[in-house]
Amino acid sequence: MGGAAVFPVGYYELHPDVTLNFQLNRFWNWVGEPQMLDELRRVAPSLTNYDEWVRQLFALGESALGEGRMLAGAYLIRAAEFFMSADDPRRRRARQTFLDTVLTQCGVSADQHHDVAYGGTNLSAYRFTPASPRGVIVVFGGFDSYIEEWLPMLLALRDAGLDVVAFDGPGQGAALEAGLPMTAEWHKPVGAVLDHFRVDDVTLMGFSLGGCLVMRAAAYEPRVSRVVADDILTDFTACFAYRLAGPQKALVVNAGRLPAAVVDRLINRARSRNLLADWGIGNAETVFGVNTPAEALAAVRAMRTDDVSSRITQDVLLMAGAEDHYVPLAQLGGQIQTLTNARSVTARVFTRTESAQNHCQIGNLGLSLQVILGWLDDHTGTPG
């Protein structure tokens, strides 16, 4: 298979905070516009807190839209929305502006959108089918994205000959707006999507936390023949704790052994001193539909793969960044060791030399696409 999409190559030091630097690179990578990169370089030193992040990136986004730089404007607005609190009155408008703009710019028509019945409401899904499809790939995101962000990659997969189905599952994007919290029983939304589109023998791919969810779904869904984890993620609790200081790390890791009231008190105290901890716990409460830090961390603990990996019998592609600041690289080895019944396991570590060392290969999405397509060539019997 061959893909015609062109993504920028390069990961830039824009901000001293590793998380904020990643997010700036993340949203720029979908656009690749030099002017947008220059603007991010200019404002980055003044992004000292989330309020400034939201204010300045929102202003840049509105300015870009006014100048007719529509894709840059859309992703700048989405970047601003990323750190808005769940009750921020600007959030709904920002999300809708992003959706309207990116769908138009990517040429997505109304008939490519589908409502998939699930949980008393609907999941939002898209299908992009080439003239002569070489197989079906079903795609979803993770903890803090929604599927429309991935449109450039989804359309590149279609242009490479794949029949692409992509959706927001519970806790993601439109599903979260509809009141569906994230679930560890990910085979259920996947099953609903496969039922709706009447597809079988599919490749199932999850991005970010989706690398955990894809394993949890494949373990119970026989219509999945191939599994792509981009990136691997075996233990969400370890990821939550990864960049925290010693005492905070110990608290997150051991929260299940402590009384909930104690966890809530200590976590709330840490939130008052740590912006990332405050955002992470607040976002977890929203995504999992719970009200306290202890409840959020209990839901996080269910996001693991060691309890389902031995059930996976498909071909599996595991992708990992050598310097992923969200997911410890050691989780790659852990995932390999627990896939004891997989038909085949292929692991690919992306490095700084490739500008792909970060989470989900931000810095070289084109290489990520190339690796996925090459692996599919080897495992579907339909080489390009």
Image (cartoon, rainbow, N blue to C red):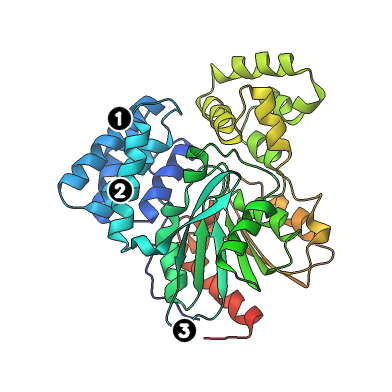
Q: Is residue 190 left or right of residue 101?
A: right
Crowding near the residue tagged with mark 2, few <14, some 14–19, many ≥20 C-alpha atoms within 10 Å: many
Name which quarter of the figure residue 221 lies in: bottom right
Location of residue 231 by image quarter: bottom right
Above or below, 337 against 173 in this view is below
Q: How many marks?
A: 3
Q: Earlier in the sequence, mark 2 or mark 3?
A: 2
Circle nearer the N terminus (1, 3) = 1
Residue 235 at what x, y percent from top left? 72, 44
Residue type pointed to by label 1: Arg
Mark 1 → mark 3, Cα distance in angstroms: 46 Å
Q: Tell me which amino acid carries mark 3.
A: Ser
Q: CA distance from mark 2 to mark 1?
A: 15 Å
On the rendered structure, is 340 left or right of 83? right
Q: Which residue is mark 2?
A: 74
| Residue at numbered disc 3 | 132
- The residues bearing labels 2 and 3 have C-alpha atoms spaced at a distance of 31 Å
- Position of 108 relative to 371 (above/below): above
Of mark 2 and mark 1, the one earlier in the sequence is 1
Q: Position of residue 168 (x, y in %)?
A: 52, 51
Q: Is residue 82 left or right of residue 139?
A: left
The residue depicted at 39 percent of the width and 49 percent of the height is 27
Residue at 46%, 84% in the rendered image: 132
Image depth: mark 2 or mark 3 in front: 3
Whether residue 32 can be seen here? no
Residue 278 can be seen, yes or no: yes
